[in-house]
Image: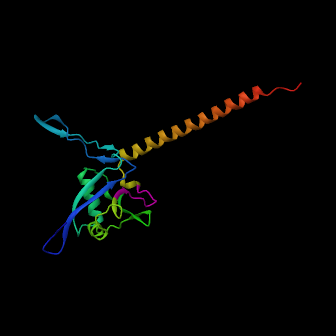
Amino acid sequence: MSINRDGTYTGFIKVQFKLARPVSLPPPRKTTLVQDGGWLQYKGLKRCTSFYLPKDTTKHLHISSQTRVREVIEALLNKFTVVDNPAKFALFERGERDNQMYQRKLSDDERPLRLRLCAGPSEQVLSFVLKENETGEVNWDAFSLPELSNFLRILQREEEDHVRQIAQRYAIARQKITEALENISTPG
């Protein structure tokens, strides 16, 4: 860390990503050639790409002691060029006390670099994790139409898999019952 003349300081924090949902990236920078009134112009593509970040992705971020949690989330999303609404995400502190792991959601006004300084350098005492904001209620207005379509497709696949598993269990049970009935000797 380095101290500035005004009493603030700057340093690095390490943030681990633990995202369960896909994130959206801006359209690729590929362009197409279009003729417009005799002139050739390049037009960009307008489709976002959604994908899952690899599990346990980490990013180091250089911030100031005045940087708040909301700004950290926005900076992290900018580093990965994620275009999702920052309100979908929350920063958590994770640590260990008395051989017990704990996790706490940080409020938007907290300052992560100050927390890091007070906790010391050990990541077992304090580490930062970016996760989906789990408020209990889903703000569906925050999602784009392609994201909502993706959710519907994912839910439909999960439902089909669940139905297939149940049908398979019943088919196995039916087969066992049929075999058991065949093995029962009829009296007489």
Q: Residue at x 56, y 37 (%)?
A: 165
Where residue 184 appears, x then y in whole percent?
79, 28
Q: In front here: 114 or 142?
A: 114
Q: Is residue 188 above or below residue 20?
A: above
Q: Residue at x 17, y 75 (%)?
A: 7
Q: Main secondary structure of the magenta part?
A: loop
**The furthest residue to the top:** 188
Where residue 139 appears, x then y in whole percent?
41, 57
Q: Residue at x 35, y 67 (%)?
A: 107
**Is residue 109 visible to the viewer in this orientation of the structure?**
no
Left/right placement of residue 39 relative to residue 83 reads left
Find residue 66 and report its image quarter. Answer: bottom left
Instruction: Indicate whether residue 156 is drawn in magenta.
Output: no
Q: Residue at x 29, y 59 (%)?
A: 73
Find residue 29 and report its image quarter. Answer: top left
Q: In front here: 34 or 37?
A: 34
Give the residues in magenta.
Answer: 129-139
Quadrant of the snapshot with the C terminus: top right
**Is residue 122 visible to the viewer in this orientation of the structure?**
yes
Where residue 123 appears, x then y in whole percent?
32, 61
Where residue 25 appears, x then y in whole percent?
28, 46
Quadrant of the snapshot with the N terminus: bottom left
